[in-house]
Every structure is written in structure tokens, then in C-alpha cells.
Image (cartoon, rainbow, N blue to C red):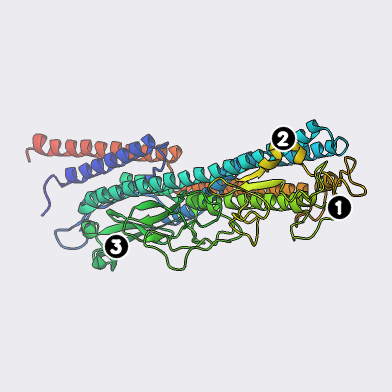
Amino acid sequence: MRSSFFEFHVASRGLFTARAGLQVVSHNIANAATPGFSRQFVEQRASQPLATWNSRGMIGTGSEVFGIGQIRSFYLDQKFWTERGVLGQHTAKTQLLTGVETVFNEMSGTGISSNFDIFFARLQDLTTNAPDGTFRNNVLMTADSLARFINTTAQSLRRQQINANTEVSMVVSTINNLGLQIAGLNERISKFEMDGSRANDLRDQRALLIDELSQFVNVEVIEREHNDDFAAGMFPNPQDRGRSDQRLSIRINGYEFVNHWDVNTLQTVPRQQGNERNDVDAPGLYDIRFSNGVWFNIYSPTLQGQLRGIIDVRDGNNLNTVEPPTVFPPAQSPFRNPNQFRGVPFYLQQLNHMVRTFARAMNEGLDHQGQPIPGSPGHVNGFARNADDPSGRWFFTFTDNAGNEIDHLDPNNPNPADPYAFMNAFNFQVSSWLREDPERLATADVPVSAPGGGESNNNVIFGFTKLAEFPSLFREGSIGDFVNALASQLGIDLRQSANFAANYHDVTQSIDNQRMSVSGVSLNEEILSMITFQQQFVAASRLMSVINEVYDNLINRMGL
């Protein structure tokens, strides 16, 4: 049997429902500009009806609010996270390759090409002034300046690799921090939703953290119901929501990272000497493994995000010339480097190839295939201005790991079969034997006592000048062609990464706009909802006034 004041109960329910609606509208409007906030709404339904006195039909008991929902598309979230990972990858590449391009500095007129041009100009001056010690000294000083510039360029490139390695550590730290925050929110959400409520604001904060995480590494987000009976639909009523046990987990590139409240954090592990992935690598570059001991494959073809972009630039060699050992020590990552991107190691290897080829041409008159260069006998076969014996010494030399200078047929050469194998852009230098005495510089191709010998014979120097334009010195052509091809390749890679970054920025922005159109707060819609709930509240209030008047007449005036 219903109460004599049943109508007051029904009208008051309408007031409470309208007030809840106004509170939610107020919350939406207050957070219209809050990043990551998704629009909320009142979950409202008709309250449990009562049977009439004769059991024919039902009489309504008003309305009730059984929850506060939020409007969010998990499908669009997943699309956004996927594309944001690709955006992060190419953004990182663009930033790091810009630093590499700055090192080469070809467009400013102070790069490698300019230094080669100055060196060949001093050689040209020497062809007509061979007896003059000043011109000899100028050639050696310019050659020394060229070698030092190449050394500095290599060192600058190595600093770019070290900087990228530091970025790896910073990204790993950021990923861990985000994972811990997400796990903390998982715990708070689970506790808040134990009574069947929805922790909408906490869920928005968690989704915003996943947005941020997705730019560093590709993520796979799974929220699964662990109560199988609830998942099977055995508890369809809102009052049974407390039986739900939803748990969120996150995988990064397929590896378990966040498992509800637990986080399998990442660790950076410096490589030990001898375990470098490239022969030009800086010492101590980081591999990554999880806190549970599982190694993270930083060379996985499915890896995305800023981490992938940094690894590509730090380790990419496009050659894969160095393989780690077949049997890996426990502290060594077991993953080989199949990285075909042209990163810092690639450009260092190209600089090494350049100095070895150029040194062989200057020293022995041989091209990149070991074939004699016409008209260029090389310094080892040349004769000094007043000498009857060939020089037999290199013009360009290098130092070994102990700092000892390695010259032609030196018994201390680490690789006698290929005397230039250990020459690189870091240890490339002008022979100290020549710098001590510029008169030792070989200029003639025959002894001074032979016919055609003497101070007028400058054929070795003429041979040096031919190297500037010799079309088969490198596979790419002349020394200028080689440097230009290297700079062009870098420019193409940088422009390609920048174009990808711009394209994926537009893609992610488009998807984010779609998310906002679904879950974002529209002030116009909220104002309409506010007016609706306001009118509902006013109508319910008016209804209570009318009911009050009815009961006042019945009780006080009619004496019932």
C-alpha cells in the first residue's frame, strides 16, 4: 500500500534527478578546457513502479539516478595511440638528424668540401713553386687542417650518438614514470568502483597518461573483466555493478609492462667493451631490459615511438657489418642489429671509408678498388727535391690505440694484410715525419740524378692535384661527388623524416578531433541540457507546490 503522501515522494524524486543533472552539467562546463576530459552524463531511469490496488496495471514512482556515465570511444583512443607512436618515431628522427646535418654543415661553406677545396688549391700553388719551402709548409699545414677538421667532425658525430644514448635513458625513465602513475590510477579506480560507481575523472586521467606514453613507445591497452559471471551477463542490473572486476593492462611492443597494479619497469644496461653493435660505436651504449630480467628487443621491426626513432639514429648503419657473438653473456642483450636506417654509425663509417680511400690515393696512387690512378704515382713512390731514393713513406698516417703513429709497412700495423683497415676519421692525420721537415715532401716521380729529375719535376704534386676531379676515386665518383652524395643522402633522410612527422601530425590531429567530437564538451549542448534540467527542476518544484495546496485543502479546510 502506498503512502498517503506518495505524490510528494514522486515529485521529490524529480527534484533530485533534475539537481543531479544540473550538477553534471556544471561539472562538464567547468572542465570544458581540461585536457583529456570526456563529457559525462546522468544515467537516469524510471524508478521501480508499484502495482495498483486491484493489481491491474502499474503506477509509476518517479525517476532515479543510478550512475554517472562518460562518453568515450575506445576505438578512437586505440587509433590515436597507434598513430601517435609513428608520429613520435619520426619526430625524434627529425630532431636528431637535424643535429647530424649541423655537424656536416655543408651548406655554410665551412664543411668537408670546402676544406678539400682549400687543400687542393695549396697543392696547385705548389706545382709552380716546389723549391719554395713556404709553399711546401702551406700544403702540409692545410693537409693538417683538413685532417683535424675530419677528426672534429667524427668527434661531433660521436657526441650526437652519445646524446642519442642519453635520450634513450631519458625516454626509459619517462616510460617507467608513466607506467607507475597508470598503475597507481588503476588501484584508485578499482577501489572507487568497488560499489559499482564509475571513476570517470580518474579514467580520463589514466587515458591522458596513456596518450603521453604512446608517443614514446607503441602501446596495446587491454581492459578485461575478470569476473567471468559478470562478463557472461549474469548480473545485468545496475545495482550489481559492484560485482565487476575490471583490470587494465598495457603492453609495450608486445611486452607486458603494466598489469593492473604492477609495473614491469625498464632498465638501461650499458654494453661492455667488445659487445658493440657497430665498430664505430661509442663505449657504453645502452641496451634495455625489464626488471624481471627479460631483454627488450630495441631492434624489433614492430617497435614505434620516440624510442624507435632514437635507436634508429643512434645505431642505424644500413650495412650491418658487425655481428655480436653467437653465445651471449648474461649481461648482454641477445638481439642483433639489423637496423637498415642511416644513422650516426652509417655516417661515421662513410667518413672512415672516405679517409681510407683518400689516404690510399695520396699515399700509393690507388683508387677505391686498388687500381692505379693514371698520372698519380703516390707519395711512397715519389722522390724528394734533392733525393735519389724514393720516399717510401705515407703522406697521411694514423695512430693505433696506444697513440703510436702507423706508417707504410709498419710492423706494428694491427692489420698488415690491409694496412688501412684501422685508419678512421678519428685517428687520420698528416705524417709527423713530413711535418718535422717539409723538405721531405716527395714532389718528383724520378730521382734527382735521373733524366728529367730535379726541381722542375713536380709530377707527384701534379698527380695529387688530379685526385680532386678523378672520376673513379670513389664508387660515387670524385671526392667532391662522394661528399655531395653523402650530404644529399642525409638531406633526403632528414626531409623524409620531417615529411612523415608532418603527415602523421595531421593524422593524429584529425583522429584527436574525432575523439573530441565524440567525447569533448560542447558548451552549446551543455547550455541546452542546463535549460532542460532547470525546467525539469522548476516543474517538479511547481508540482510539489500544487500537491501541497491539495493536501492543505484536504486536511486543514475540509477536516479530512
Q: Position of residue 238 (x, y in %)?
A: 24, 57
Q: Position of residue 407 (x, y in %)?
A: 66, 50
Check disc 1 and give the amino acid type. Gly
Q: Earlier in the sequence, mark 2 or mark 3?
A: 2
The residue pinned by badge 2 equals: 141
Q: Earlier in the sequence, mark 1 or mark 2?
A: 2
Q: CA distance from mark 2 to mark 3?
A: 75 Å
Residue 423 vs residue 520, the one in the foreground: 423
- Residue appearing at x 79%, y 52% in the figure: 381
Q: Which of pointers 3 and 1 indicates the residue nearer the eye?
A: 1
Q: Residue furthest top?
A: 134
- Label of residue 225 in the image: 3
Where's the C terminus, which quadrant?
top left
Any part of residue 278 in sight: yes
The residue pinned by badge 1 equals: 375
Check disc 2 and give the amino acid type. Met
Q: Which of pointers 2 and 3 indicates the residue nearer the eye?
A: 2
Q: Tell me whether the residue at label 1 lies in contact with that at label 2, contact meaning CB atoms closer than 8 angstroms.
A: no
Give the secondary structure at mark 3: strand
Q: CA distance from mark 1 to mark 2?
A: 24 Å
Left or right of residue 435, residue 321 in this image: left
Residue 206 vs residue 129, the one in the foreground: 129
